[in-house]
Image (spheres, helix red, strand yellow):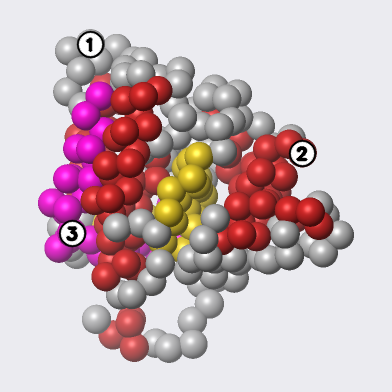
Amino acid sequence: MLPCDVLLIGPHPDDVELAAAGTILRLIAAGHTVSIVDLTRGEKGSRGTVQDRDAEAGDAAKALGLRERHNLGLPDTGVSADDAATGLLVAAIRSARPNLLFSPHARDVHPDHVAAAALAERAFFLAGLVHWEPAAGPPHRPRLHIRYPGNTPVEPSFVVDIADLQERKADVIRCYRSQLRPADRSHLTQGLDILERTQVRDRFHGTRIGCAAAEAFCLDGPLPLRDLRPLMG
């Protein structure tokens, strides 16, 4: 992968966008480079083909302005933190050398999201070890490992105001055409399609900080700050 400032890990194409498209747009507007690693191609999804998901992920990457989007090709519904998968993700982290790494929160109803959280945690640590798979590239550990909640509510460590980016985020999510407005909603988490669910969640987090929409994130331990000016509003 090409070097970037921020790398986000998604279990399936669309997971990163649902959680963090607004934050990505804000990072890129500020001059930072952002890339995504999808772990699977979403081939076991109830709607759309693999080819559909590949095309949709490409469209979303263009709408976001990503530096790069890469897919590890792990089995959908079969993600694990074994050595083979860890080696692939470690190689991606060492190649991209990001300052910030985002991955799913471990508390989630989807088994792949739970497994992806464990895989990312393992890869984050092992990527910094000189003697762990040296063939995967020079060691690198991102400065911070940030988690984004998925289907299960989690108390966040911080939230990012995306009120001015709501429509652009919606346009990114609309790239996943196969996942929107299904006639049969029986397979949907909470009975809502991905855009409906995301907008409800973003409005909820926005109300907690006095804005129209926000995205939530979690950290282990306190958020390190050197400059308090962003807290002044």
Residue 220 in the image: x percent, y percent? Answer: 59, 61
Q: Is residue 113 visible?
A: no
Q: CA distance from mark 3 to mark 1?
A: 30 Å
- Say if the magenta span includes residue 177: yes
Q: Look at the image and tell me whether residue 44 can be seen.
A: yes
Q: Which residue is labeled 1 in the image?
A: 184
SS label for mark 3 = helix
Mark 2 secondary-structure assignment: helix
- Location of residue 54 by image quarter: top left
* Mark 1 vs 2: CB contact within 8 A: no
C-alpha distance separating marks 3 and 2: 39 Å
Provide the residue span drawn in magenta. 154-178
Q: How many marks?
A: 3
Q: Which residue in the protein does label 3 denote?
A: 165
Q: In the depicted view, which residue is nearer to us: 132 or 105? A: 132
Residue 62, compared with residue 164, is above or below; it is above
Secondary structure beneath dot 1 equals loop
